[in-house]
Image (spheres, rainbow, N blue to C red):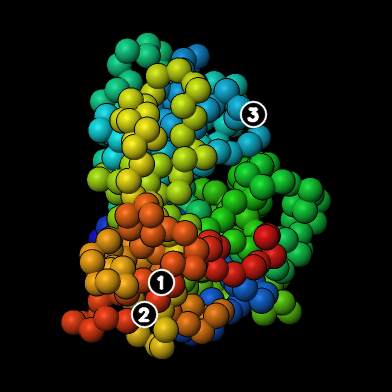
């Protein structure tokens, strides 16, 4: 098992540690409910250093990434980031990721931890025709800290008083110095709240982590584990690889058509997406259940006539709404909000309803 540069801090803080993506990661500290509410109401700090980090460089770097990705990198300016997808030729998703344009011919990619090796090999497999383009894996050298919540930017500006963090728009980033070392601060996140994700060298990660926690004490900051990270993203309806999206799911079926730019030149999986667009049969939707029973991944979903129409992608008890919520992949005719459904939980049918996403209103929406 790999450990992040912050592992000893998590251990000393009494975090519950689990294996996630090949890393020993904190799943919770004080508890998922308290950590979730801290992010919704004040601020939370996350160690997400298990994510994969790649650099793509060279005069044909953009051309290469245009071929590999579904989104349009012609629209990505220096100093901005872009949510993106890599597809297999049949239209299934290799991974979802964020691409940062560092310089004209330099791009930085953050990919899912569990997919990092697969992603690197997939990119490497297709790079040869793009002469002069290099692919570098910096995962083991870099840390990633997320600071999220309504008070996140105030805390950040306490540590970086000269940084115009509030002026950064969503998916914009800037460089800053901490203890003489350069780091990257991006207005991105996975919670639906205001905040940033900070990429920096391992050797200064602990110092910055402690500085942010110290600056956030008056604001109620809490360290947050992977458990609350999941409930926060689910309340927003954000996709998680292996749940809403995977190698068998086309992005058009997963509410991600906005990331697939059909008008750009050829990219891997384009023809498959065009075929699905012509005859879209399924879709991912939000839902809630009556009572307190928890929907879990792979539970079957039925219509009110008890005909099977799909399956649960993700489910939890929403800490904000205090009701069971989830996402499901169902036959397209059932994705309209207000549609009644049934979810089978341990042999019993439980009534539910299709809901509009996101489930909650946050400091961003």
Numbered badge on residue 340: 1
Q: Quadrant of residue 218?
A: bottom right
* Residue 93: image location, x then y, percent: 32, 41
Is residue 141 visible from the viewing direction of this image?
A: no
> How many residues crowd mark 1 within 10 Å: few (<14), some (14–19), many (20+)?
some
* Residue 215: image location, x then y, percent: 70, 70
Query: Looking at the image, is mark 3 or mark 2 earlier in the sequence?
Result: 3
Query: Residue at left 36%, top 71%?
Result: 341
Left/right placement of residue 180 relative to residue 138 reads right
Vertical relation: 2 (above or below) 235 = above
Left/right placement of residue 121 relative to residue 101 reads left
Query: Residue at left 76%, top 64%?
Result: 154
Asked whether the residues under the numbered discs 1 and 2 touch, taking CB atoms below 8 Å apart as contact, a structural biologist would say yes
Question: Marks 3 and 2, Cα distance to the nearest angstrom?
Answer: 47 Å
* Residue 124: image location, x then y, percent: 29, 27
Vertical relation: 265 (above or below) 94 = above
* Residue 294: image location, x then y, percent: 35, 81
For the residue pair 302 and 67, the one nearer the viewer reads as 302
Q: Which residue is mark 3?
A: 77
Q: Secondary structure at mark 3?
A: loop
Q: Quadrant of the N terminus?
A: bottom left
Query: Looking at the image, is mark 1 or mark 2 earlier in the sequence?
Result: 1
């Amino acid at each position: 098992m790999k450990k992040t540069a912050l592992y000893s801090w998590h251990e000393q803080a009494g975090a519950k540690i689990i294996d996630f993506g090949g890393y020993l990661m904190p799943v919770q500290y004080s508890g998922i409910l308290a950590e979730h509410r801290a992010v919704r109401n004040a601020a939370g700090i996350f160690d997400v250093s298990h994510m994969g980090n790649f650099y793509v460089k060279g005069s044909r770097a953009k051309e290469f990434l245009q071929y590999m990705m579904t989104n349009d990198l012609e629209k990505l300016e220096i100093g901005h980031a872009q949510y993106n997808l890599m597809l297999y030729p049949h239209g299934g998703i290799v991974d979802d990721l964020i691409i940062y344009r560092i310089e004209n011919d330099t791009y930085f990619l953050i990919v899912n931890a569990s997919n990092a090796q697969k992603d690197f090999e997939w990119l490497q497999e297709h790079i040869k025709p793009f002469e002069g383009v290099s692919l570098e894996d910096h995962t083991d050298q870099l840390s990633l800290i997320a600071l999220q919540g309504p008070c996140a930017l105030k805390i950040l500006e306490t540590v970086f008083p000269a940084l115009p963090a509030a002026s950064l728009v969503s998916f914009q980033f800037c460089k800053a110095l901490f203890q003489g070392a350069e780091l990257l601060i991006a207005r991105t996140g996975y919670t639906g709240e205001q905040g940033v994700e900070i990429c920096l060298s391992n050797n200064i990660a602990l110092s910055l982590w402690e500085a942010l926690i110290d600056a956030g004490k008056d604001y109620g900051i809490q360290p947050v584990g992977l458990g609350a990270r999941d409930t926060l993203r689910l309340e927003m309806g954000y996709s998680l690889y292996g749940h809403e999206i995977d190698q068998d799911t086309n992005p058009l079926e997963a509410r991600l058509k906005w990331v697939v730019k059909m008008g750009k030149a050829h990219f891997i999986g384009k023809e498959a997406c065009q075929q699905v667009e012509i005859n879209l049969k399924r879709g991912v939707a939000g839902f809630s259940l009556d009572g307190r029973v928890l929907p879990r991944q792979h539970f079957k979903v039925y219509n009110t006539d008890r005909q099977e129409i799909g399956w649960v992608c993700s489910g939890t008890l929403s800490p904000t709404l205090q009701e069971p919520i989830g996402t499901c992949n169902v036959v397209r005719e059932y994705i309209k909000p207000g549609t009644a459904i049934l979810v089978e939980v341990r042999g019993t049918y439980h009534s539910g309803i299709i809901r509009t996403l996101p489930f909650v209103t946050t400091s961003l929406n």
